[in-house]
Amino acid sequence: MKKVISVLSLFLVLFLAACNNSSGANANGSDADGPAEVEFWHAMSGPHEEAIKKFADDFNSTHDDITIKPVNQGSYEDLQQKIMAAAKAGNLPDMAQATTNVIPEYIDNKFITSLNDFIEDPEVGLSEDELNDYIEVFRDSSTWDDTYYSLPFSKSTRVLFYNQTLLEENGLEAPKTWDELQEVAKTVTKDGVVGMGFENSYEAEFQGILKQMGGTYMDEATGEPEFASKEGQEAMGMISGMIDEGIARTAGEDEYMSNPFGRGDVAMYIGSSAGIPHVGGAMEDGIEWSTAPIPTLDGEAATTFAGNDIVIFNQSEEAEQKAAWEFMKYLTSPEVTSEWSMLSGYLPIRQSALDTEEYQKFLEENPAYKAGTEQFDAGFFIARVPGGDAVRNIVLEEMDYILQGMKTVEEGLTEAQERAKAELQ
Amino acid sequence: MQKPTWKSTLKGYLYLLPALLILVVFSIYPIIKSFLMSFYTDYDFFSDTVNAYGLENFTKLFQDPNFITALKNTGIFVIGVVPLSIIISLAIAVLLNSKIKLSGFFRTIYFLPFVTSVVAVAIVWSWIFHSDYGLLNYILGLFGVDPIDWLTSPTYAMPALIILSIWKGLGFNIIIFLAGLQNIGNQYYLAAKVDGASAWNRFKSITLPLLSPTMFFVSIISIINAFKVFDEIFALFNGRPGPANSALTVVYYVYQKFYEEWEFGLATAAAFVLFLIIFLFTIIQLIVGKKFVHYN
Amino acid sequence: MRKEALSKGTIYILLSLGAILMLLPFVWMISTSLKAPNEVMAMPPVWIPSEWQFGNYSEASESAPFGTYFFNSIVVTVLTTIGELLTTILAAYAFSRINFYGKGIVFAVLLGTMMVPGEMLLIPNFVTVSNLGWIDSYEGLIVPWIASIFSIFLLRQYFFSVPQELSYAAKVDGCSDFKFLWYVMVPLAKPALITIALLKIIGSWNAFLWPLIVTNSQELRTLPVGLSAFTTEAGIKYELLMAASTMVILPMLLLFFVMQKYVISGVARSGLKG
């Protein structure tokens, strides 16, 4: 490994020397004599951002010729907006996090770099084995017509967070089915505590329950949304029913459930596995908590896998792109992805990372992280279509109308489906 | 002043040049451009090419239920803010004008919110409006009012926004009213007092009529400003137009279409509609204002 | 003598009640910003923190680069203000003291553009700025704002009030136009210039929508943009959020306290002019 790196550094030094004459125009300011500076835009905050900073520092200290500069851009929406604005102005960063939903748009507008050349490069590429070590579903979601435009990075699944202290006080255990969950929620909803919580963007829960009921959110092959089906209405009815009954709430003005859950205002909630360190940080003293897999419905287990990839933009000089590729490989290496997972609650994206003794030991010691990795079999992806981001916003908007009682479940979902269809045309 | 010569013309434009350069590029050109852009029906922002022109944006706009919601909400906001704000600020201005000590001190306090960042105070208010731990619900609770979901219920989101906006803008109106009040000659009041008119009658028959041009002006300015509300919403509801679009206003709609969805044509068309509305009020002000104003 | 409608006492009570309502959010902001986390959510509310947590301020500055935001806000505010003063002085002089062809038309066109809401200019200006490659740069934040039609009108009115004879006298003394403007007119117009500068300072310090859309990197964010991003960055920790808000609000409050005479007269004039 060391040898590879030193050969690489030499290569990069030569490379940098070669572009000594041409650089200077780059907005990202690669100093011709200094190391290649790679700007990395992301939407990670709190403990996640800390982890990214650490990886960048580690990487920088072992790569004299590359400097990684992580930049937080706020929320995923902010990040996406900033990338679109920067693409036009010609000052894109060298690499960024990107949800799979938005990548088709980047490809259409031709500002992201195909990774095939890097991957196939004999010097800096990935071997067949290495490539296959990336978990298959994640690999699939990174390719468009056999071309890699991204590598998986921050991939998460949904887990059920529960307040152990409170449940034990009531002689209860973490629910395993949705029926049990509703019972538990009913029992513990009192004294200002609400039993169950949903994130403000709880479409993942809707998609999960819909799948458990045997319905389809969006047809893979045709890209047609189908969520307003009978199953869809039942699934949505279940969520809105719990909220109307008062045994569940959304995060509302607390933005993320980790806040009210941490205060002990909510006994359980379903959220991203990546929320684990946030919950750890928000937890008030004296509250024991853990996570469990998503409850089953009539014996069916299902949960969505979501998250972000990392991409490289083609507005940068070749040296920066190459340096970005190095960092990309580093971030997705088995060592880093398992450490990333331990620090962040995201899932490891390499099979070998999952199997290491260290990671298994970590799961033993930190059972909260276990639920996520136990669900690989139950995991599924929502169909990846261009315009998927807009559909998501439409669904969230209509779901909001339903929860606020401004539309019935049927009206809201039908309307959402109509609008989604129009959007996807 | 001398007649213009070519030499003085050259000099004149030289002096104007810096300001004119900026204003032409960033104020005048965009007006024309924005008018044109509203007819772009197929525009590629990345290559800056227009593939098709047409009126489609406007038809699309008025078929979009969200735009209708935005118009409606903006209307409600204007009606909610303007009259209340004017009544309250007029009352305070009259009190401040009643020759009391400390009037300058009070004026300063009422004006404070006006100089502060909308974003910062909106964030402070979002904390005050918090349904479980907010100050407002606590105070209301002392009077036996159940906690209100100010920021998460579509019923109360707009009232919350209106409360914030009135608080923020009160100072401006008070200053204008004070200036107007001080322009009213004291002789009217003296004469009225001699005639034995009551305070209310004096207010009704002297203050109000003589203040009417000011009131008219304040109303128009307030209406125009209320039509442009955006920052407050963005900060109060954390980057969303309120629960279930209950605080979606025209400018917010423009922002969404433009910056979130990159629909430049639709966004400029919406901005153009906003301009027409504001233009209408400006014209009213110019015409009616001319008739109203009477110089003593 | 007839009785007044309201006694002095009643007036004081009413005004004080109003003043308390106006001040309450600020007091609550500062109080929350100095609390320990467990007191923030306490019910009934704690008004005076049992222990003053000044550390919240440094914690907030550490969780987000408020130092950088602060610096950017100052750079942008100072440069736009200086820029606007310069363009305004020159333009107002041309409109008030020089007679040139097309003056009436130029003046009328400018007057007309004042009716157009800034929101309408937002999108084309964004396109212009990105074509210039000014997205995420100080140029993009500053240049579009260094001229103001309103300020030019304000100063023009003021220049008109300076007696014409002064300029004749200066001419006789062999004083050039520019020198006359700089050494005679500008000092005379100081109150108007201070007012213009203060309104500009307040405006650009608090500006939000434009900096929001033209900045990408943390390095170029101004305070309001940084503050709004902070709500997502830090999760919701109200004591830190309030500390950050205080940092944004306080400089303008202090400036206002010192210079309120000019600010208020400026606002009153903007109103009376119509």
Image: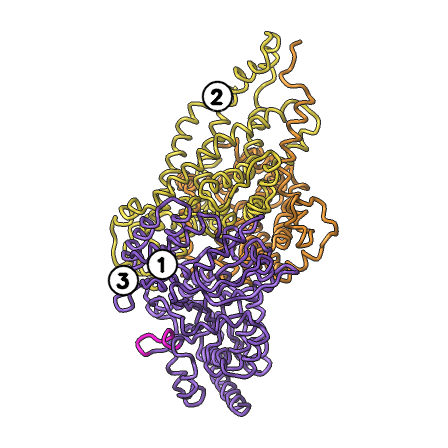
Chain colours: A purple, B yellow, C orange
Marked residue nearer the N-terminal end (3 or 1):
3
Which residue is denoted by mark 2 in the rendering?
Answer: B294
Front position in the image: B119 or C255? B119
- Which chain contains the residue that carries disc 3? A
Between the residue at mark 1 and the residue at mark 2, the CA separation in whole angstroms equals 55 Å
Q: Residues within 10 Å of mark 1 (few under 14, many from 20)?
A: some
- Which chain contains the residue that carries disc 2? B
Q: Is residue C45 above or below residue B170?
A: below
Q: Are marks 2 and 3 on the same chain?
A: no
- Foreground: disc 1 or disc 2: 1
Q: Quadrant of the C terminus of chain A?
A: bottom left
Q: Are marks 3 and 1 on the same chain?
A: yes
Between the residue at mark 2 and the residue at mark 3, the CA separation in whole angstroms equals 67 Å
Magenta span covers which residues? A139-146
Residue type marked 2: His
- Foreground: disc 2 or disc 3: 3
Q: Residues within 10 Å of mark 3 (few under 14, many from 20)?
A: some
- Foreground: disc 3 or disc 1: 3
Q: Residue A354 in the image: x percent, y percent?
A: 49, 80
Q: Residue B75 in the image: x percent, y percent?
A: 40, 37
Element type where label 2 sits in the image: loop
Name the disc covering residue A390, or none.
Answer: 1
User: Residue B285 sits in which quadrant?
Assistant: top left
Name the disc covering residue A404, or none.
Answer: none
Residue type marked 1: Ala
Q: Are marks 1 and 2 on the same chain?
A: no
Q: Residue A366 in the image: x percent, y percent?
A: 58, 72
Q: Is residue A260 visible?
A: yes
Front position in the image: A367 or B154? A367
